[in-house]
Image (tube, rainbow, N blue to C red):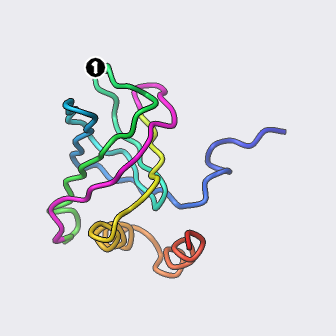
Amino acid sequence: MTKNRADLRQATRVALDVPVDIHQGGSVWPQRLIDISLTGAATTQPDLWDAQYNEPFTLIIHTSGERGNEAAELELYAYLQHVEAGRLGFGVQHVDRENIEPLRRVLEAHMDAAQLEEEFGRLE
C-alpha cells in the first residue's frame, strides 16, 4: 500500500492566504501562499512559469496584517518538490536565524502550541 503525501509529512501545514514572491535568479513571480509548515510551503502557480526546477528558490512571504502578526516579511529558502493542478509545492531546506521566530509566530497563530513545540523538537 502506498502512502499519500499527507501521511509522509513530518510537519502540520496550515492554510494561509497571503501574498508571496517566488524568486529565482533574476526572476520574480508574485503569487499567493496556499499553506505553510516548518518544512514546506505551497503556492499558486504562475501562468508563465519558466523556472529551473533543480535550482533553489527564495520565498518572500508578506505576513503583515495576518492575525496581528507584526512581521512584514518571512524569507524561506526552498526547492521545488512538485507541481500539480496550479499548485507549487516547496520543501524548505533551511530557515535562517532571522526568520525562525517570524515563522514560529505565523504557525503559532494557526495551530496548537504543544503540537508546534513537538514539531520543532523533531527538527533538531
Q: Is residue 60 magenta?
A: no
Q: Amino acid at mark 1?
A: Asp
Q: What quarter of the picture does the N terminus occupy?
A: top right
| Position in image of residue 82 (x %, y %) | 51, 32
First to last magenta residue range: 70-87
Q: In this view of the protein, which residue sits in the foreground, 66 or 51?
A: 51
Q: Quadrant of residue 21?
A: top left
| Position in image of residue 116 (x %, y %) | 49, 74
Disc 1 crowd rating (10 Å Cα; few below 14, some 14-19, many 20+) is few
Residue for badge 1 = 47
SS class, disc 1: loop
Main structural element of the magenta stretch: helix, strand or loop? strand
| Position in image of residue 51 (x %, y %) | 34, 25
Which residue sits at x=44%, y=70%?
111
Q: Quadrant of residue 122?
A: bottom right
Q: In this rendering, is residue 45 above or below 41?
A: above
| Position in image of residue 47 (x %, y %) | 28, 19
Q: In this view of the protein, which residue sits in the foreground, 21 or 51?
A: 51
Which residue sits at x=63%, y=43%?
5
Q: What quarter of the picture does the C terminus occupy?
A: bottom right
Q: Is residue 85 magenta?
A: yes
Which residue sits at x=34%, y=29%?
45
